Image: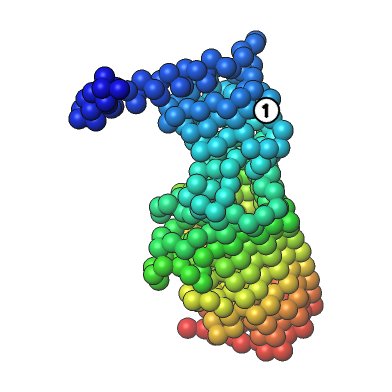
Amino acid sequence: MKRILFTLSIVLLTGLCINEIQADYVQQSFAASYNTIRKDKGRWFITTTIDLHGQTMTLPNNCTLVFDGGTIENGTVVGNNSDCQAQKKCIFRNIKLQGTWHVSQIPSEWFDFGNDARKNLQNFRNLCTLTDDSHPGTITIKKGKYKVAIEKNDASALPLNSRTTLVIDGTLLLQPNSFTNYAIVRADQKQDIVIRGAGKIVGDVDKHIGNKGEWGMGVSLLSCQRAVVQNLTIRNCWGDCLYIGQHRRTADDYCEDVVIDGVTCDGGRRQGLSLIAGKNVVIRNSTFKNTGAVRFTWPGAGIDIEPNSPETVVDNVVIDRCTFKNNNLQFHGDLLFTNLPRKANVVVKQCSGLKKVSVRDNAYGVHIQDCDIDTLLVANLKSDANFSAERCRTKIITHQQH
């Protein structure tokens, strides 16, 4: 007993000894876990708990993780053109994924989502890490409520890669923050994106900290090609529920071949949907309501088509059979078209609930067809603006020229 006490006293008095013993224990534990992995022809079989103890495990090239009753926990796993095969149950706990992966089916059940918004943020990022620009992948977020945080400006909880289908059947709840510019879901310079599901994306407008900025988006598409957003509800965002724009403010930078179908944008602080730069964009069968109802900021329209510069591309845009309700009528109302380029071409047809439509300030190429409009405001258009309203029932038409 005396010898044991003497040994312990030395360890307690010497921090270096503690650190060395801890490091040695971690290495031994990690090695013991690692040695349980059965490796066969590029496949690693995970049959028990692999505790990384905060360490990093780097996979060899083209390795496939096959989970057969085991998990990987407490550390970082770096993929190297890696794949993953598992049933729909938790296989990663307290894990950060890095490197390159090309997993085709990625269920949220693989990760330990819970009530910790920042831990959930890492898990959402992990879901995206398992995809790759060069391989198709489907991320599925099952039913349930998921708190999520944004950790800094210009960040996104779910930064999508090309060729990704994101299926949201749960509800993503952004926790209050003080940032000015972010997106819950973002695709930036990506191709072949699908974002769909019966779920909801909910922003923080009612509890946002401070009053700065207006660019907290629900879904943001920047300079993307071939993108679809379908059937989701996007609510209560600090900026816009849906933003279609550009990565750089140049004439040749824009989204192309975008479809917004069956989406509900509800309670966006600034806009329901902003279209800044786009070619071949279809917005159909969607609902835009309650814009600016909480902590309104300008412009405050259900849909605002407003390029960043006169050279920005806005071409072949169709708004078809959309519904508008309770958008801020004191300002621009349901639809706002402003500063569109001379080559613009926008068609609005068979939309309902239009209380106020504003076409103003050098907007070119706007054509409204077969719509009921309470108030149509036409202001400051050039003589060659190429504006038309055909087969529309309009109570009040106001022309303003400054």
With 78 as the anchor, is 163 left or right in this view?
A: right
Give the residue at the far top of this rendering.
Answer: 41
Q: How many marks?
A: 1
* Residue 377 seen in the current view: yes
Query: Percent from the top left, x then y, of residue 210?
Result: 39, 70
Query: Percent from the top left, x then y, of residue 165?
Result: 68, 42
At x 50%, y 47%, the residue is 119
The answer to whether residue 102 is above or below residue 176 is above
The answer to whether residue 332 is above or below residue 231 is below
Q: Quadrant of the rendered structure where residue 278 is?
A: bottom right
Query: Percent from the top left, x then y, of residue 87?
Result: 72, 33
Locate the N terminus by quadrant: top left
The color scheme shown is rainbow
Q: Nearer the viewer, residue 201 or 248?
A: 201
Could you tell me which secondary element the residue under label 1 belongs to? loop
Residue tagged 1: 69
Give the residue at the far left of this rendering.
Answer: 13
Give the residue at the far bottom of this rendering.
Answer: 396
Amino acid carrying label 1: it is Gly
Q: How many residues crowd around disc 1 within 10 Å: few (fewer than 14), some, or many (20 or more)?
A: some
Q: Quadrant of the rendered structure where residue 292 is?
A: bottom right
At x 65%, y 73%, the residue is 289
At x 66%, y 70%, the residue is 288
Query: Percent from the top left, x then y, of residue 336?
Result: 59, 73
Q: Nearer the viewer, residue 132 or 395?
A: 132
* Residue 364 seen in the current view: no
At x 79%, y 74%, the residue is 370
